[in-house]
Image (cartoon, coloured by chain):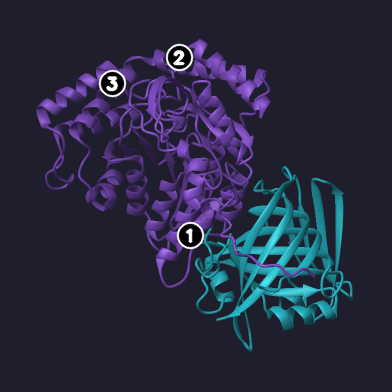
């Protein structure tokens, strides 16, 4: 048998580790973990991860400017990484409404929603959203993350059971953790697995799904999930962060797409994607909304949304309702790019939406692909483990109604060339 | 200089399964905490080894272990993960005694038989039984991904009547891994192997499937704690 020694930290090849290796740590001091992470990060950041967190110096439109973390200014990058599905983030009507609200209300709300931070513009937005969603009532939160935290932890308690699709967003999982309810994950979009896990569970049950899954771009198999949930007496909550305002005949989300608007009890969404702002909301019956207003701690104990953002989101909502042709353009762009990518033999998983995973599978190669695309003027960010499953690394492409056909063709052509060259 | 004991591997299949956190905690000694890949769930590893070279010659081994929170800072090299072996079973008495004496690993005290059935480079099944022919476990990996070189560093927490130990080991070789959930597990829980092993609530669909072929396990040392 060989006799050797080990004196290397193991971080010289940073790709031998990932974020999951520094999450857990026991011992006497948290700095043992922090220091280990820092040693790894000192290799990983310059090696690959510097392409994250790069500050934009322009609006998040289809063409953007960036100050790279390596000290370079990049202009005119073709942006396929934004949630700005309908181009509302930088629309004139939204900017005008926000500026007007700043003139009227000032910058911040200067208080939480219960005591002093509720402005008339907030109530206007809530009424408009409830009317749009054909629900009795609505309340808003400071972010989609805060909304899921507040709704789930406001509703469920120790002794209850929450069933979550395994691909659900971190905010749903964190809301469940905060609620102290028992949490059971079912396999992605798999109603049979949900049934296997829910059938013998007594007590109060909540099933939570997303309309469009944010990393895979596939629709929730809502009819099957609803059928199982109803069969076993569970309430159903949907997160329409990526599907709200773009799916369904009138933009009311996946629930409208499947004709299940009445069947889904709690309908949550965000303002940061299709509406181009920030914030979260939940719509439901008045009794539910009043209960969450009373017990949704992430809302109760936060300063209310800035009035300017609220006014901008309201203007965005009204514009989107009045201009259904934007949604049509978006879906036309989605269909065009999908067909181009598939024609080039590019794997986009099971995507049926503006979120298209460009599957690379290799956790390291995905960075090389992203960097090669950047050189060609395309801003398209990589996602690897642990943000997605092992061996499921991808570039996370988002289509906007603002993209031109030429831009869509350009990204398809360049993706094809880069993927073939790697 | 640290003496390293090497175990050459022709095939190792390792699947990670989720089980309730409460179940895992009951199996762990005080001071060890299970890792929680999903809120409320712990990770059980079931591993089948085919060792072609070792200090006690060729042998095969079955290991049930829980993934636990590692101790960063304990070793110069940062651990990729840490495990608490619940029970180890070997095909040979010599191998069993070697692992007990050197590494303080808890053992099922009967000899086992391990058979690998490999259809192709993408799928493999391991079947383990005792010498009386009674099956303990069948474990299958399917739809493997690309094969890549790996060099992973582990901490292994062990204890016996002589004390508590941390084993330091590395796994090197060519590995494929995925989280497609296409593998399978069949536990024969009526077998006496499971008498001290309550795995209530174990999800039989693997969260992750890993296959090392070929490889080497390098056991560096055990530290008494």
Which residue lies under the disc numbered 1? A36
> Residue at the location (63% across, 53% down)?
B207
Q: Is tag 1's residue or tag 3's residue first in the polypeptide sequence?
A: 1
Whether residue A378 is visible:
yes
Classify residue A105 by image quadrant: top left
In the displayed structure, B115 sits above or below A172; it is: below
Quarter placement of the C terminus of chain B: bottom right
Q: Which of A42 and A231 is in front in this view?
A: A42
Classify residue A108 by image quadrant: top left
> Residue at the location (89% across, 75% down)?
B131
> Residue at the location (66% across, 67% down)?
A5
Q: Is mark 3 on a helix, strand or loop?
A: helix
Image coords of residue A359 (percent x, y)? 61, 33
> What hue represents chain A?
purple
Q: Which chain is cyan?
A: B
Direction from residue A201 to residue B128 in the image, left or right: right
Q: Is tag 2's residue or tag 3's residue first in the polypeptide sequence?
A: 3
Q: Nearer the viewer, residue A81 or A353?
A: A81
Q: Distance between the residues labelled 1 and 2?
A: 48 Å
Direction from residue A258 to residue B125 in the image, left or right: right
Q: Which of marks 1 and 3 is in front?
A: 1
Whether residue A218 is visible:
no
Q: Distance between the residues labelled 1 and 3?
A: 50 Å
Q: How far apart are marks 2 and 3 (CA)?
A: 18 Å
Direction from residue A250 to residue B163 in the image, left or right: right
Q: Nearer the viewer, mark 2 or mark 3?
A: 2
The 10 Å Cα crowd at callout 3, few under 14, some 14 to 19, many 20 or more, is some
Label 3 resides on the chain identified as: A
Q: Residue A329 carries which label?
A: 2
């Amino acid at each position: 048998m060989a006799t050797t020694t080990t004196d290397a930290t193991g971080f010289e090849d940073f790709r031998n580790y990932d974020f999951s290796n520094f999450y857990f740590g026991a011992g006497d001091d948290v700095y043992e973990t922090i220091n280990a992470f820092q040693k790894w990060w000192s290799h990983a950041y310059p090696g690959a991860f510097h392409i994250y967190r790069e500050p934009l110096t322009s609006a998040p439109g289809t063409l953007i400017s960036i100050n790279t973390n390596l000290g370079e200014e990049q202009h005119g990058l073709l942006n396929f990484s934004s949630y700005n599905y309908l181009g509302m983030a930088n629309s004139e009507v939204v900017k005008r409404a926000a500026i007007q609200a700043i003139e009227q209300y000032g910058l911040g709300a200067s208080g939480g929603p219960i005591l002093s931070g509720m402005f008339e513009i907030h109530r206007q937005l809530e009424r408009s959203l409830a009317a749009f969603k054909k629900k009795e009532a609505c309340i808003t939160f400071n972010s989609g993350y805060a909304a899921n935290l507040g709704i789930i932890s406001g509703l469920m308690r120790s002794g209850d059971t929450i069933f979550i699709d395994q691909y659900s967003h971190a905010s749903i999982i964190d809301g469940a953790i905060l609620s102290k309810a028992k949490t059971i994950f079912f396999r992605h979009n798999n109603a049979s697995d949900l049934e296997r896990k829910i059938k013998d569970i007594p007590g109060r049950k909540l099933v939570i799904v997303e309309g469009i899954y944010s990393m895979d771009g596939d629709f929730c198999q809502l009819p099957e999930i609803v059928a199982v949930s109803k069969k076993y007496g569970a309430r159903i909550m949907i997160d329409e962060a990526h599907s709200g305002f773009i799916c369904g005949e009138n933009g009311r989300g996946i629930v409208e797409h499947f004709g299940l608007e009445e069947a889904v009890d709690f309908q949550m969404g965000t303002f940061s994607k299709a509406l181009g702002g920030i914030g979260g909301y939940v719509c439901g019956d008045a009794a539910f909304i009043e209960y969450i207003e009373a017990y949704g701690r992430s809302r109760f104990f936060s300063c209310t949304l800035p009035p300017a953002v609220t006014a901008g989101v309201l203007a965005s909502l009204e514009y989107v309702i009045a201009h259904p042709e934007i949604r049509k353009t978006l879906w036309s762009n989605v269909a065009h790019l999908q067909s181009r990518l598939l024609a080039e033999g590019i794997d986009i998983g099971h995507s049926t939406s503006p979120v298209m995973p460009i599957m690379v599978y290799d956790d390291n190669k995905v960075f090389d692909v992203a960097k090669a695309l950047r050189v060609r003027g395309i801003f398209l960010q990589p996602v690897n483990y642990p943000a997605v499953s092992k061996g499921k690394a991808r570039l996370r492409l988002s289509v906007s109604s603002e993209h031109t056909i030429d831009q869509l063709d350009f990204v398809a052509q360049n993706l094809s060339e880069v993927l073939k060259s790697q | 200089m640290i003496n390293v004991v090497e175990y050459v591997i022709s095939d190792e299949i390792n699947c990670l399964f989720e089980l309730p956190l409460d179940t895992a905690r009951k199996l762990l000694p005080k001071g060890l905490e299970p890792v929680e890949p999903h809120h409320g769930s712990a990770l059980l590893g079931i591993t089948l080894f085919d060792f072609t070279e070792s200090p006690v010659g060729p042998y095969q081994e079955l290991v049930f272990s829980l993934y636990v929170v590692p101790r960063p800072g304990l070793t110069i090299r940062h651990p990729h993960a840490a495990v608490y072996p619940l029970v180890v079973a070997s095909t040979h008495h010599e191998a069993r005694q070697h692992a007990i004496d050197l590494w303080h690993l808890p053992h099922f005290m009967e000899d086992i038989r391990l058979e690998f059935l490999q259809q192709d480079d993408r799928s493999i099944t391991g079947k383990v039984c005792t010498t009386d022919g009674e099956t303990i476990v069948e474990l299958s990996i399917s739809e493997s991904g690309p094969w890549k070189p790996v060099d992973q560093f582990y901490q292994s927490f062990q204890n016996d009547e002589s004390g508590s130990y941390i084993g330091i080991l590395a796994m090197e070789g060519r590995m494929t891994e995925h989280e497609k959930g296409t593998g399978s597990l069949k536990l024969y829980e009526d077998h006496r192997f499971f008498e001290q092993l309550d795995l209530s609530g174990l999800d039989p669909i693997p969260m992750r499937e890993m296959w090392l072929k070929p490889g080497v396990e390098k056991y560096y040392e055990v530290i008494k704690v």
